[in-house]
Image (spheres, rainbow, N blue to C red):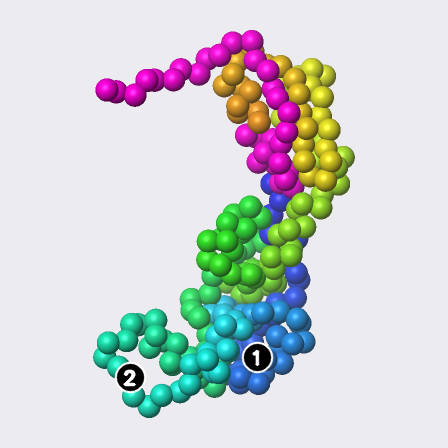
Amino acid sequence: MSIEVKDVMGRVAIAVLENASFADIVAAMKRYAVGAVTVIDVDRRPVGVVSEDDLLLKESNPVRHSVSMFESARRRREHQKAAGVTAAQLMTSPAITVTPGTPVRDAARLMHGKRIKQLPVIDPVTGRVTGTLHQRDVLRVFARPAAELEAEVRALLPDPEAFTVEIDRGIVKISGRVQRRSQAIALMEAVRAVEGVVDVEGEVACDRDDIIIVPPLM
């Protein structure tokens, strides 16, 4: 079973309009205890995100009246944000979004790769923001009941009666036997990929090694 964003997302869209003031953004972050807010247009479509890091540039990057020709594009953008007073001027764009049907595993990879802590969730048809996915929401998959995890793991087994499966705090302990080594490897990888599995321990034995290792060319 693939857990999707709609199964864990927050139903509150934490967002501000493009003309929201610096103070409005700070107030929204404080009210919802978040480190970023989505910036939306008048049709409620995400156009960017303002994070605490964007706001901190006001203090760490004082406004300057001249710009060096040797500055990078990133530094120039930081100076522009430091001078900004509205969400449109402060935001990082475009907004990185997911839909309710996005697998949580994909959303987690996106968060990790982009180094972001929350994602706007949009309607796939209208593009309008419908909620917010936080890192803490993604981590909820690791709180799945052990019985639910075990049922999904056993559904992967070629012969459930020939295997023992124990689950302790997300760690799956499995033992049993299959015909080929390739089957054992594939099975362990499939169990490890189950949503909510923290780690896999144990050993799946095999009757025949069908993995051919080609020696390196001299």
Q: Does the magenta stretch include residue 198?
A: yes
Residue highlighted by disc 2: 67
Can residue 7 be spotted in the picture?
A: no
Residue 83 occupies quadrant: bottom left
Residue highlighted by disc 1: 25
Please state the horizontal and vertical placement of residue 118, each as a whole percent of the image.
Answer: 56, 61
Q: Which of marks 1 and 2 is nearer the N terminus?
A: 1
The residue shown at (71%, 46%) is 143
Please state the horizontal and vertical placement of residue 172, each as a whole percent of the image.
Answer: 67, 32
Look at the image and tell me in which quarter the C terminus lies: top left
Magenta-tinted stretch: 189-218
Amino acid type shown at disc 1: Ile
Q: Circle 1: is it few (<14), some (14-19), or many (20+) Cα within 10 Å? A: many
Q: Is residue 8 above or below residue 19?
A: above
Residue 80 image label: none
Can residue 171 be spotted in the picture?
A: yes
Residue 67 occupies quadrant: bottom left
Q: Marks 1/2: CA distance?
A: 27 Å
